[in-house]
Image (cartoon, coloured by chain):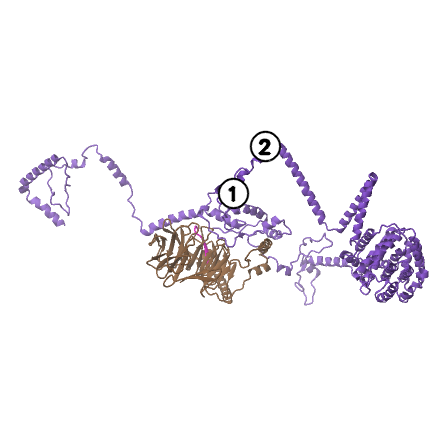
């Protein structure tokens, strides 16, 4: 079932019984006139964005019957092309019922596929055998494969930096990669205390938001290892998907208890029109905060966030575990031949291999 | 297969002889066939002659028989023709032989891998072209999203107009009108008439004229601005001065006029007179306004206000002056009663006196005099005289007495039979009181024309009879105002310093001597021939001690303070404290000598002096104190724990030296310490987005062709930012890809 909502009135405009079984993925066409869904019934359907007129039946524009179950779909940013993933990555032309090409590398179910918004022929996908595979649509070949310690759930390309993408991993971390240097991630973002299920970039490319199984949503700056903000509410359960609106002001998240939540991207920002003086004052305050951010008391205020007890305790636990591991490694290094226990940086730790 | 082959071979070898003849026939047959085929012109395709053994043997042309010629080995080895075309083939063959054998084709996986690798290298190269843009954007001081802002293009009016045509009848009509009057419709912005005029005037002229006009306009605007500014000046003093100067100017002019053209001067005078009369008729300067009243209240405390009030009163008087020429007869008339009071006193005061006698203040003599005056004057000008008298009285009356006195007055009034002005309000009374102040002042200032003031006094005063109870407060203040004002004037002009002194003495003498003082005081007044002037002089008395007191207080202040803090010498205390701090700051020598160590003896022994000296650790001298040349300061260089909780304990990441960090903290951001522009620049947010504006991802056509990127909007700002950043030495942490 697919529901279309009006965000301003918070009302469901339209309900479509799109597939039999789960709807595994959906994406909108770049022009915003239609959207695609894939479901467990091995079909890909294209729907109109506006609701049918009175008396008209709710029917998809196109329906494609596939051979295998599709688990995800993404649309090209400029052309009438979309990609689905399942057992392999298929690239489809909107006008045809058979894929333009199928890209495979090994046999495994692929959980998500994403087009690069800038270099639109690039595709990234993550499979359940812990790897991230990049594809080139022009040559219709895969490019490279990175195997991480644990499975990657989703990845998202940076809309302002063509070669940067972030992967949301099961090991509670997010990894930002530069696709030219896949040997180690550029940054490891760690703050979640459970598997990260979804990630989405802000349209400015400076931050991204991640949804986690630990019932919280976090916002990370791209170049920082820790989050700047954490969102949670008492009733919000495991957050499954998250999206950043394209005007950079809001974040939408969908969670297990069947709710969609709309958050402000910058929690302390005032909505609505600001008087020039007010704006100046805001900017000034912001700059002051930035200037004195290293002062202990100010840092304490700026960084203080309330967390639910479960997350708080888990964080503490994680810290203890990490500390213990570190200590153990130190001890091992101390008591073994020098050089036999090398120092591995945190970034390198999580990458198992890069397959050409 | 081998047996088959053998069989085939064997068969012909066995029956060679028998086949001889048949073979001959066959050959002939073939020749015939050849001939026939050659006849037909088209050569038949020759069937390949098979000479080798094979599985698939054609039954038609198997023959092991040669042509009959003998084969020689050398023939076989040699080429058919000595310079054969095969040489090139042989060469090639040899070349091929020299080459290594071709490798096995790659396995599918490997082939794919090669393709992948190549594709990856190529793609990453492609993607690498964004590096510049990305770095720019990361370093940008400010990014405004969406990066590409569409600038609305302005279509010039002519273009817009050209596309437009008159359609409706109204439009057509308008156009027809325009055409008829030869107005410019499209491009030429001048009408024919204008062009003609343009031609008429030369450029030079036009320029000159324009400059003139400009100058005139500028001047006008300056004057306007000046006038506006002047108008907006709030200072009362300024306006007063201005007015005064204007008046003076007018006077001067008038004098000039008088000299040059007496007739005109006369006319002018007339005019002035008219003006004055108008002014007098109007209720201006009646001292009833808000301002006047407030001044009256303030006058008690404020010298300025007092002065202002005086001035105002003087003005009022000046304006309301009746310009009738006094008859000389009147003066003696008035003078007589003035002289009379001593005699008349027993008559009128008989009512008031019992109360007056009980008065503790030295004000007593005055009212009596006035009353006396009033009593005598009654028959002459009953209403007015009485009023004067009343006023005079009011000034002296203290609160308790006021009521009683009021009764007396009323009685008097009844006797006088002048019930006019009954309904006058208390405010009026107050203002009236104010009104008669200048009179007295003037009387004092110029003792000569004492009569006219009195005459002036009459008209306004004749109007009312005061209601008593609510007046009291005001009366008091007025009294003092008057007194103070007159005192000032007295100081200025010094008309009778001795008299004033005398009065001061009088005041101090107190109520006991009041009665005795009455007569001399009165006489003095009379001798000064200032009936009204006397009154303010009297009233001025309370102010004298007041001023003295103030002065005393001013002088005493110091003394009081010194007296209060006589015990502690702060400076010495501070010196002591500083010495102590210095002592505490000095590094102390540490003795490491242990008693009993290395000596014979038991406990309780003191280590020997030699040993003490030997084990004494002398620390190096401390660095000079920072306050050693500052006698009035103690600078403590110890770490303050309470402050430390608020201080940064370690150098934050991007900084390399603590000086850099300190400088960054020291640089002020606020508008108080920066210009507005600098403030705006300093506080500009790093990323600017607008609500409801979709930010598209970077577009592929934004690729820099080795030049500026799509973030060109951010470039100037970035440049500025870098310039500004460098002094701070604040490298921005950027990630290394």
Of A313 and A277, the residue lying toward us: A277
Q: Is residue A47 left or right of residue B579?
A: left
Mark 2 belongs to chain:
B
Image coordinates for residue B257, horizontal then vertical, percent: 81, 40
Marks 2/1 same chain: yes
> What is the display colour for chain A?
brown
Residue B173 badge = 1
CA separation, marks 2 and 1? 31 Å
Image coordinates for residue A84, horizontal then vertical, percent: 37, 56
| Mark 2: few/some/many CA within 10 Å (<14, 14-19, 20+) | few
Asked whether residue B711 is drawn in magenta, I would say no
Q: Is residue B295 left or right of residue B70?
A: right
> In the image, is residue B604 above or below residue B299?
below
- Residue at 67%, 53% in the rendered image: B623
Of A232 and A332, the residue lying toward us: A232
Image coordinates for residue B689, horizontal then vertical, percent: 52, 53
Q: Is residue A132 visible?
A: no
Q: Disc 2 marks which residue?
A: B199
Label 1 SS: helix
Query: Can you tell which of label 2 and label 1 is closer to the viewer?
Result: 1
* Magenta segment, prevailing SS (helix, strand or loop): strand
Which quadrant of the figure has residue B636? bottom right
Q: Identify the mark nearer the N-term, 2 or 1.
A: 1
Q: Is residue B455 visible?
A: yes
Of B161 and B585, the residue lying toward us: B161
Image coordinates for residue B403, horizontal then vertical, percent: 84, 66
> In the image, is residue B493 above or below residue B430?
above
Specify start and end residues of the magenta stretch as a single range: A174-181
> What is the display colour for chain B?
purple
Label 2 SS: helix
């Amino acid at each position: 079932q697919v529901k279309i909502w009006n965000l301003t009135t918070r009302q469901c405009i339209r309900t479509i019984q799109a597939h039999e079984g789960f709807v595994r993925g959906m994406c909108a066409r770049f022009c915003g006139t239609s959207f695609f869904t894939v479901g467990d019934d091995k079909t890909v359907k294209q729907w109109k964005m506006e609701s049918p007129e009175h008396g008209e039946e709710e029917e998809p524009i196109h329906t494609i019957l596939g051979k295998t179950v599709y688990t995800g779909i993404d649309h090209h940013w400029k052309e009438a092309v979309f990609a689905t993933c399942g057992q392999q990555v298929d690239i489809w032309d909107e006008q045809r019922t058979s894929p333009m090409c199928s890209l495979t590398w090994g046999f495994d179910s692929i959980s998500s596929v994403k087009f690069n918004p800038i270099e639109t022929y690039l595709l990234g996908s993550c499979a359940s055998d812990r790897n991230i595979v990049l594809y080139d649509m022009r040559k219709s070949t895969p490019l490279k494969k990175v195997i991480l310690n644990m499975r990657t759930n989703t990845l998202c390309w940076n809309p302002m930096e063509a070669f940067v993408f972030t992967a949301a991993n099961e090991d509670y971390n997010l990894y930002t990669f530069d696709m030219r240097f896949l040997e180690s991630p550029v940054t490891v973002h760690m703050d979640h205390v459970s598997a990260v299920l979804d990630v989405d970039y802000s349209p400015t490319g400076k931050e991204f938001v991640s949804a986690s199984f630990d019932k919280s949503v976090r916002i990370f700056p791209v170049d920082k290892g820790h989050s700047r903000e954490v969102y949670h509410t008492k009733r919000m359960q495991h957050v499954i998907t998250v999206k950043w609106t394209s005007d950079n002001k809001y974040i939408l998240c969908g969670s297990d208890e069947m709710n969609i939540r709309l958050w402000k991207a910058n929690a302390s920002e005032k909505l609505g029109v600001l008087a020039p003086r007010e704006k100046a004052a805001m900017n000034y305050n912001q700059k002051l905060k930035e200037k004195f951010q290293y002062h202990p008391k100010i840092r304490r205020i700026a960084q203080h966030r309330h967390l639910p007890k479960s997350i708080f305790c888990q964080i503490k636990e994680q810290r203890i575990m990490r500390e213990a591991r570190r200590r153990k490694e130190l001890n091992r290094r101390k008591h073994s031949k020098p050089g036999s226990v090398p120092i591995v940086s945190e970034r390198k730790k999580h990458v198992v291999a890069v397959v050409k | 297969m081998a047996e088959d082959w053998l069989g085939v071979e064997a068969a012909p070898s066995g029956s060679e002889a028998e086949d001889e003849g048949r073979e001959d026939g066959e050959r002939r047959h073939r020749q015939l066939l050849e001939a026939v085929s050659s006849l037909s012109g088209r050569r038949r395709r020759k069937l390949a002659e098979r000479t080798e053994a094979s599985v698939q043997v054609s039954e038609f042309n198997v023959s092991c028989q040669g042509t009959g010629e003998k084969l020689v080995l050398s023939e076989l080895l040699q080429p058919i023709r000595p310079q054969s075309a095969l040489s090139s083939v042989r060469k090639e063959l040899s070349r091929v032989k020299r080459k290594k054998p071709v490798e096995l084709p790659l396995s599918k996986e490997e082939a794919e891998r090669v393709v992948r690798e190549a594709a990856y290298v190529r793609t990453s190269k492609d993607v690498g072209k964004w590096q510049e843009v990305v770095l720019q954007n990361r370093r940008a001081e400010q990014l405004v999203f969406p990066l590409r802002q569409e600038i609305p293009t302005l279509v010039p009016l002519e273009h817009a107009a050209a596309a437009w045509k008159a359609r409706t009848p109204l439009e057509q009509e308008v156009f027809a009108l325009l055409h008829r009057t030869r107005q410019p419709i499209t491009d030429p912005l001048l009408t024919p008439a204008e062009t003609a005029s343009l031609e008429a005037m030369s450029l030079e002229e036009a320029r000159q004229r324009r400059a003139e006009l400009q100058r005139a306009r500028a001047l006008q605007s300056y004057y306007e601005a000046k006038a506006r500014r002047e108008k907006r000046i709030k200072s009362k003093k300024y306006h007063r001065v201005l007015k005064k100067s204007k008046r003076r100017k007018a006077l001067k002019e008038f004098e000039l006029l008088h000299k040059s053209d007496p007739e005109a001067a006369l006319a002018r005078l007339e005019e002035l007179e008219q003006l004055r009369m108008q002014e007098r008729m109007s209720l201006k300067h009646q001292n009833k306004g808000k301002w006047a009243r407030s001044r009256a209240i303030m006058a008690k405390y404020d010298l300025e206000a007092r002065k202002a009030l005086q001035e105002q009163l003087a003005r009022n008087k000046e304006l309301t002056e009746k310009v009738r020429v006094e008859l000389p007869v009147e003066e003696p008339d008035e003078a007589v009663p003035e002289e009379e009071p001593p005699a008349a006193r027993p008559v009128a005061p008989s009512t008031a006196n019992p109360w007056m006698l009980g008065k503790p203040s030295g004000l007593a003599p005055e009212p009596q005099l006035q009353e006396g005056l009033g009593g005598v004057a009654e028959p002459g000008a009953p209403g007015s005289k009485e009023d004067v008298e009343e006023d005079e009285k009011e000034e002296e009356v203290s609160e308790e007495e006021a009521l009683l006195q009021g009764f007396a007055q009323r009685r008097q009034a009844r006797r006088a039979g002048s019930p006019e002005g009954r309904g006058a309000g208390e405010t009026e009374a107050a203002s009236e009181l104010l009104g008669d102040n200048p009179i007295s002042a003037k009387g004092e200032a110029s003792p000569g024309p004492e009569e006219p003031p009195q005459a002036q006094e009459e008209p306004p005063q004749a109007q009312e009879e005061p209601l008593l109870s609510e007046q009291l407060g005001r009366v008091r203040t007025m009294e003092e105002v008057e007194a103070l004002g007159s005192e000032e004037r007295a100081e200025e002009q010094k008309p009778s310093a001795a008299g004033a002194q005398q009065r001061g003495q009088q005041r101090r003498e107190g109520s006991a001597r009041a009665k005795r003082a009455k007569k001399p005081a009165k006489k003095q007044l009379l001798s000064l021939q200032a009936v009204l002037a006397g009154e303010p002089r009297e009233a001025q008395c309370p102010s004298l001690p007041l001023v003295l007191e103030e002065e005393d207080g001013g002088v005493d202040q110091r003394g009081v303070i010194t007296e209060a803090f006589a015990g502690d010498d702060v400076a010495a205390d501070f010196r002591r404290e500083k010495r102590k701090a210095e002592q505490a700051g000095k590094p102390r020598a540490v003795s490491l000598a242990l008693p009993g160590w290395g000596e014979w003896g038991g406990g309780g022994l003191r280590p020997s002096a030699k040993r003490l000296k030997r084990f004494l650790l002398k620390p190096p001298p401390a660095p000079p104190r920072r306050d050693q040349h500052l006698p009035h300061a103690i600078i403590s260089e110890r770490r303050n724990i309470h402050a430390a909780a608020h201080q940064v304990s370690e150098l934050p990441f991007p900084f390399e030296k603590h000086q850099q960090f300190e400088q960054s903290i020291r640089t002020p951001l606020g508008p108080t310490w920066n210009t507005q522009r600098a403030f705006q620049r300093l506080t500009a947010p790093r990323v600017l987005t607008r609500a409801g504006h979709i930010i598209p991802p970077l577009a592929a056509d934004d690729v820099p062709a080795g030049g500026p990127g799509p973030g060109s909007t951010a470039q100037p700002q970035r440049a500025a930012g870098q310039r500004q950043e460098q002094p701070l030495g604040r490298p921005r942490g950027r990630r290394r890809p």
